[in-house]
Image (cartoon, grey):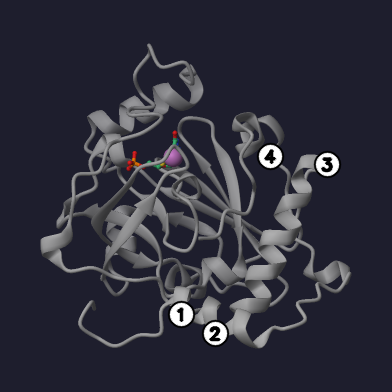
Amino acid sequence: MPDKKLITRRQAIVAGLASASALVLPGCSEDLPPTYGHLLRMGDNFTYRAQRLLLPTQHPVREYARSEISSIPAIGTTDPGDTSHPAYTEELGGAYAQLRDGGFADWRLSVEGSVARPGLWSVADLQRLPRKTQITRHTCEEGWTAIAEWNGALLKDVLEACGVLPSARFVNFSAYDGWEDSIDMWDATHPQSFLAYGMNGRDLPVPHGAPVRLRVATQMGYKSMKFLRRMVITDEFVDPGLSGNIQNGWSWYAGI
Ligand SMILES: Nc1nc2c(c(=O)[nH]1)N[C@H]1C(S)=C(S)[C@@H](COP(=O)(O)O)O[C@H]1N2
Ligand SMILES: [Mo]
């Protein structure tokens, strides 16, 4: 809703900085974001904790008008079912190709872990939840940004429908190109975190993550995982190792 007056995250950060004359980051382990025990990962601690201190409530990121939608390049895996793709495996890529050829009618998102009702979600199941739309800016670590409209279900609504347990702290995602990543509950329940099945008013196309991708407006583009396969809710951080962002030298936490 671009015409609605919202306090943007930027304004909130400025306000937070102005009042936080002494920004102390206490060493309470509960606040610690996960790291991989790697020296370079210490930056995660700082950005994560500083953002959580400055933005204790889930301020929305800026939304745009339809006229501001730009063309968004498809980055990384453009089709996990393409046998020539370096990430292709028969198990994942082959399975994706079959689902793609069937118009994703057989696609199911497996929801597991710290939920009262684990299960398999089809696109139609997600479409039965309230359909939400956001026009937000996608920011890639490679230096480009683009504005698109995303249509989908709030991740929060999906989690609630699955009966997420109070002990749950992380939502872990796996994709058909073998990628694994996670976000914390704060970002997962943010009002602009979507499981998107549509883009610019159409079904989500394959290069952009069909049939369903994560869309996390509060973090850099690489956190918005495409080609979703599995979603595991955990009480503890799960380190995906080389299947995660560390393979690219990217931080686990990439708040913007
Ligand atoms: N599964 C998967 N998700 C992914 C990627 C990828 O290669 N595989 N690339 C990420 C990166 S770096 C960016 S910038 C965005 C790009 O989204 P787009 O291809 O829709 O532009 O997807 C993110 N999600
Ligand atoms: Mo990216």
Horizontal and vertical percent for residue 225? Answer: 46, 46
Please, is residue 71 above or below residue 167 in the view? above
N-terminal-most mark, 1 or 3 = 1
Q: Label 3 sits on what residue type?
A: Leu
Q: Which residue is mark 1?
A: 11
Please, is residue 144 above or below residue 114 in the view? above
Q: Label 2 sits on what residue type?
A: Ala
The span from disc 2 to disc 3 (Cα, nearest Å) is 31 Å
Helix, strand or loop at disc 4? Answer: loop
Quadrant of the rendered image holding ligand 2? top left
Q: Which residue is mark 2?
A: 15
Q: Which residue is mark 4?
A: 240
Q: Label 1 sits on what residue type?
A: Gln
Residue at left 14%, top 57%? 201
Q: Which mark is residue 39?
A: 3
Q: Is mark 2 within 8 Å of ligand 1?
A: no
Horizontal and vertical percent for residue 53? Answer: 68, 77
